[in-house]
Image (cartoon, grey):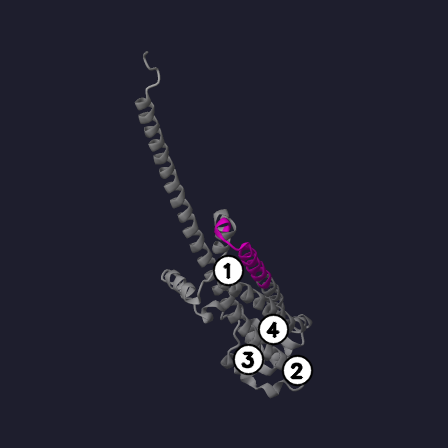
Amino acid sequence: MKQFFDKDFWKNTAGCTVGTLIGILLTFGTSSYLENRNKTEMAQKTVMLTLHNLDASTRNMQTLLDELQQYDTLFTRAASLMPDRLGQMGSDSLQMFVNAFGSRRLLMTDHTTSSIFSNSFEVWQCLDDEKVIGRIGNCYSVLDVCRKEYLRMEELRQKAYQAYWHECPPMDYPDAEKAAKALLERYDVRYVLSIHSNVIQMLKHTHGIVCQLNERNKQVLHITQEELDEVGKLLEQNSYNIKSDDMQTPENNLNENEVNE
């Protein structure tokens, strides 16, 4: 009787089919592995850039706070000597007071890194600790609050100084003491001075929170400061070097020679 079931045929067919399936699985498995590895590497790079960006932002904020604290010491000293003892500060210090109150700083903020992180869903999936995402988001939110509060105070100070300037420019007064006294007698100036210390304390507190959150993320992700510094070196190769003096406008400065003339 003729066999309708050819064992060799089915054995060969099964072998080819299994081989083909294994080949397909290996191909797609390898592709999937490489894709996932690329996503993981990209996520790690994004996180490194994000943490470096937060490092740079906190350092910039600290520099700003140090400057504000110096100004506040000068402002407080001048206000405490009103109205009859301003001369105790000396002409140079009074000039510094007027110039500091009228100074403007260019505050530059780069939102590129925060946008990349917040819009990269793949990054979130590759992070083992979901709290890292929350901490990073909180860092950017708090820094934004600091920036807005700083700009609000700066706007009040600039409006007060411009109004003072329009009445009589500081170099038109006979000496620095009279220029400083006229500035301190203004209600809008006194209001700015009254909130200046409180705003600085608020900024210091919120800045401390950002630093703590950022340091916690470094610990959880096992990222060293040396690694972040290396990232910074790569970025700085194509960056501009802007000195702090370049970020202030010079046109409002009260020059000693102009006052004495």
Vertically, is 173 above or below 129? below
**Mark in the foreground, 1 or 4:** 1
Disc 4 to disc 2: CB gap under 8 Å: no
- Residue of label 3: 95
Q: Position of residue 2 (x, y in %)?
A: 32, 12
Q: Give whichever of discs 2 and 3 has the lower sequence position.
A: 2
Left or right: where does residue 228 sit relative to residue 92? left
Which segment did they paint magenta?
Answer: 124-146
The tag on residue 109 is 1
> Label 1's element?
loop
The tag on residue 80 is 2
The tag on residue 240 is none
Measure the C-alpha gap from mark 4 to mark 2. 23 Å
Disc 3 to disc 4: CB gap under 8 Å: no
- Residue of label 4: 168
Closer to us: 22 or 3: 3
Label 4 neighbour load within 10 Å: few <14, some 14-19, many 20+: some
Q: Position of residue 121 (x, y in %)?
A: 50, 47
Q: Position of residue 189 (x, y in %)?
A: 65, 72
Q: Give whichever of discs 3 and 1 has the lower sequence position.
A: 3
**Mark in the foreground, 3 or 4:** 3
Measure the C-alpha gap from mark 3 to mark 1. 31 Å
* Amino acid found under the numbered disc labelled 4: Cys
**Mark in the foreground, 4 or 2:** 2
* Amino acid found under the numbered disc labelled 3: Gln
Measure the C-alpha gap from mark 2 to mark 3. 16 Å
Quadrant housing residue 201: bottom right
